[in-house]
Amino acid sequence: MKTKIFLIAIFLLAAMLLGSCTSTPDLPQNTEPPNSDSTTEIPPEKPVDPFESLRASNEEWISYGLAAFESGKQVENLKEFFSDRNNMTYLTLYDHFFTYDKEKSVPVAEALFAFIYNEYGVEALLDLDKRCEYKSAYLKSLGSEIEYINAPEIEVFLASMDFSSNATYKYIISFGNITYYFKDFSAGSPSQYHSLLYYSTTGLLEMIEYLKSNNLNEGLDTERKFNYYMTFDGSGYSKTLSSNGNMYINDSSSTLHEAVHAMGITKNNNIWLSEGICNYFGTSLGFNDQIAASCIQIFTMAKQGYFDGNEQYVLYKKVYEDYIARGGKIDSVDTFDFRLYSDVQARAELDANTYKTLGDAYKIVEQTDCNAVGNELSYEQATSLVLYLADTYGIEKVLEAYRSQDIEAAFGKGYDDLKTDWLTYLYK
């Protein structure tokens, strides 16, 4: 029996061993045997572009400079060119210069690009904070003792402009929703308008922020697109079309005044109120430093005797003397007192009785007579009156009077009584 069991066990063991030797392991589905001749291809590395950041720049001068550098073009030696101080403005290299005078602007762009790249490296070409420094270094490399003079903040700001051109307006310069349209630069050059572009734009943005933060923007469209058409037709008076808010500028100091009109101050039933409010925000609060600088320049000329014996400018001298006598300062735009300036200007005009009224200005601009309340005042007189009312009643009450056009309801007095109160204040 044991022998029989032993033989069965041996038989089963042999069968198991035979099965394990002859069975084929399962292969994965859809798997092909490896090809010994195949190799794995590694994609080639993309070459590094050292000028990638420059190609993304929107500045036209960099594109000209880069094209010349990559083509191996020999840049011009501009030592003689920059020995003429009038050519220094070409170093600003803002986009509109290439439309104004491409022949001179391109060589400057190529030469400056090569200098900055060779001296400071590729990233320095985009370093706006040091660009004035680099331009002065470039002039020094030419043997010039003249430094490049431009305020760094203006340099940075104007480099951010969007520039375009069309058949009607050769120079269209935009900063966000603020656009300036020039058919030409008259008898001047682009650089003569750089300060206007900077101070008008930054001043407008600051004024809008002031209106919003002080909750004075009710009924004013501060988010609109501001279109400035720089006409300079010789009339001396700017205007805003109430139909679309487009502004036509004939006086560089009027850009913020007209912007207040464009935001919605357009009612002329009480012309003294609308014009006074526009000057209140657009001039008297000092958002545009260029206006104060212009006043200081005139006063400095009066101080130096420039207007002595000149009947045409006798009013300027009188205003200056009154301004100084009443404690006004002319040492900086920050200390210039627009409130005092408006008062002494208004009083000098009333005393001399030789000034253009709001009615005169309206007729020039609109080509029609103006019989609105307050048309007998000048711009500065209307401004002084509004400043007086703002100090006495609050600017909120002045704006309320404008919105309702009901002067007596807003102030408790009519226009004539308010004017009498103002004159009493003015001559005290």
Image (cartoon, rainbow, N blue to C red):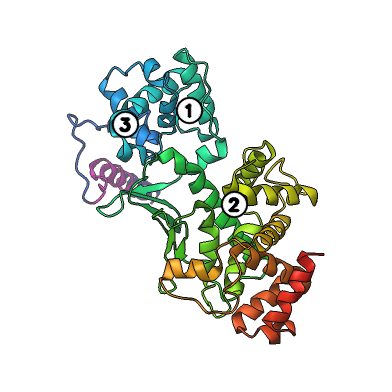
Q: CA distance from mark 3 to mark 1?
A: 16 Å
Q: Which residue was labeled with disc 1?
A: 124
- Which amino acid type corresponds to the residue marked 3 in the rendered image? Tyr
Q: Quadrant of residue 142?
A: top left
User: Magenta includes 319?
Assistant: no
Label of residue 64 in the image: 3
- Indicate whether 174 appears above or below 50: below
Instruction: Please tell me whether mark 2 or mark 1 is closer to you in this view.
Output: 2
Residue 398 x %, y %: 68, 75
- Which amino acid type corresponds to the residue marked 2 in the rendered image? Asn
Q: CA distance from mark 2 to mark 1?
A: 32 Å
- Label 2 crowd bin: few (<14), some (14–19), many (20+), radius 10 Å: many
Instruction: Please tell me whether mark 3 or mark 1 is closer to you in this view.
Output: 3
Q: Main secondary structure of the magenta part?
A: helix
The span picked out in magenta is 11-29
Q: Quadrant of residue 23?
A: top left
